[in-house]
Image (tube, coloured by chain):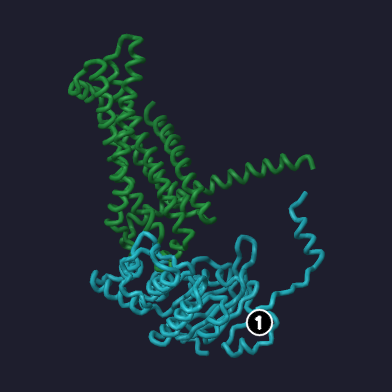
Amino acid sequence: MNATDLAIDVSHLVTHYGSRKILDDISFQARQGEIMVIMGGSGSGKSTLLRHLLGLHQPTSGSIKLLGRDITKLSADEMYDLRKNMGVAFQGGALFNSMTVGENVELPLREHTRLDDNTIRIMSRMKLEVVNLAGFENLMPAELSGGMIKRAALARAIVMDPRLLFFDEPSAGLDPVVSAELDELILLLRDAMNMTIVVVTHELDSAFKIADRITVLDQGRILMSDTTAAVRASDNERIQSLLNRTPRNEVINPDEYLERLTREIF
Amino acid sequence: MTLNPLLSFVSQVGQRSLQSVREVGYHAALLVEAFYWLLFGHWRRQPVRLGAVFKEAVGVGVNAIPIVALASFATGMMLAIQGIYTLRTFGAEEQVVLGIALSVTREFAPLITGIFVAGRSGSAIAARIGTMQISQEIDALRVIGINPVRYLVAPLLAAMLLTLPALTILSDLVALFGGALYCAGELSLPIDIFFERTFEVLVAEDVIHGVLKSFIFAVIVTLIGAGNGFNVSAGAEGVGQATTRAVVLGCIGIILADMVFTFLTSR
């Protein structure tokens, strides 16, 4: 893999929450124009990984290179420039509730460009067209359904035509039809705009439908980061149990169990 | 074993103190950052927009006019009633004008205004920012490349610094009018004579003293409201707690700052 066409290059990332280690030695890469799905069960650390990829937290050690720049070492100004090339659609949408849908989508353009008002409106309407929300720009976020909120959030995320798009749990809380539509939309964005798209999800169907490559996280470590076919064919026990939805049966160590129960009791 | 309750008490006191110091430090940093964006944001490509400042000024200032005016009117009248009642003992009812004029401009107007704005806007600021925090809107701002302090706190601070002194002067006038109205009824003192005497006894320093206080109150209300909002982490209940804390700490902060300021400047 040529280093220059790597859109995302994470190496030896270690993060802590307080004294608890959340991510342990995470390394993976994604190329430009690729859909990378980060998969894992609840508590596997995938949300934490996403927050670090977005530069919302500072890791304990390791590096995160986005579009060739290490975001753990960038100055605020350099990060500001990089953010113009990043779009994020949060799990709950995170639309600004005090603004209309249209104003939400326009906000990045208003902050980052000096385009005139009409141009900004036209550009944001174009993105609302892309996500099939044309004509909804004057509604408030509270008046939208769950699926519409996700699509509006997606429109806001792509309004600057970013090279990197992050999508947190696109199908969470949506019915199968709507979530299938979102999957189609993600594929369309990659093909039409050559975006690198990182999708964090625990939905298997959706993951295998859209992914070029899958990174499987488990308890803060990477089990595997490879092509969809390779992940499906993996004989790793934890990956198979994730794919086949079998409950994990961890062997309990009696001493540790007793220690956990009696900890901090005098 | 017997040491444990004592030990845990001491450790709790220590942790609480540490928490308080941390909180004061946090708010101080917030203040510095908000001023930084107000002054230098333009050069850092993070300008504080005038439109946002005016929008906030309407919310925290203009919309507070009726309630502040009503409270000030009642306070002025109450001061006149109490003043006349007290001074009657000495047969010096006429001196009530001096008492009202000084206590309104130096103390009551800024304090009443500050406390009402803390109750009205301090809670609203905490609730708004707290809700944005739990719905990831603050994160959304950051990933778009918008500094949340620049976008949410700086315009608010500017609006507060603009409107609170103005509200205080309004409160001065309305409270004096309330006092004048009562004196007109009780002492048959014409309103124009009341104001004439008021302006005889008042010097500019008295009014400035009150206005200076209102600047401090503006900073306190904004910072405590915003700081509590940003620190919300635990869902809807957290937002509720933050709004309560913002009001209680805001009012206490105002009264304590008032005491310190008055102590330092009036002796």
SS for callout 1:
loop
Is residue A68 at all visible to an observer of this figure?
no
Give left or right: position of B149 versus A233. left
Amino acid residing under circle 1: Asn
Give the quarter of the figure containing the N terminus of chain B. top right
Residue A94 image position (x, y, % from top left): 44, 65
Quadrant assignment, res B65: top left
Most foreground residue, B247 or B14: B247
Residue B60 image position (x, y, % from top left): 33, 46
Residue B208 image position (x, y, % from top left): 29, 34
Dot 1: within a 10 Å radius of its alpha carbon, few (fewer than 14), some, or many (20 or more) residues? few
Quadrant assignment, res B172: top left
**Chain A drawing hue:** cyan
Residue displayed at 36% across by 77% down: A132
Number of labelled discs? 1
Q: Which residue is mark 1?
A: A244
Q: Chain of mark 1?
A: A
Give left or right: position of B189 versus B255. left
Which chain is assigned green? B
Residue displayed at 29% across by 75% down: A123
Is residue B159 at all visible to an observer of this figure?
yes
Residue B49 image position (x, y, % from top left): 29, 58
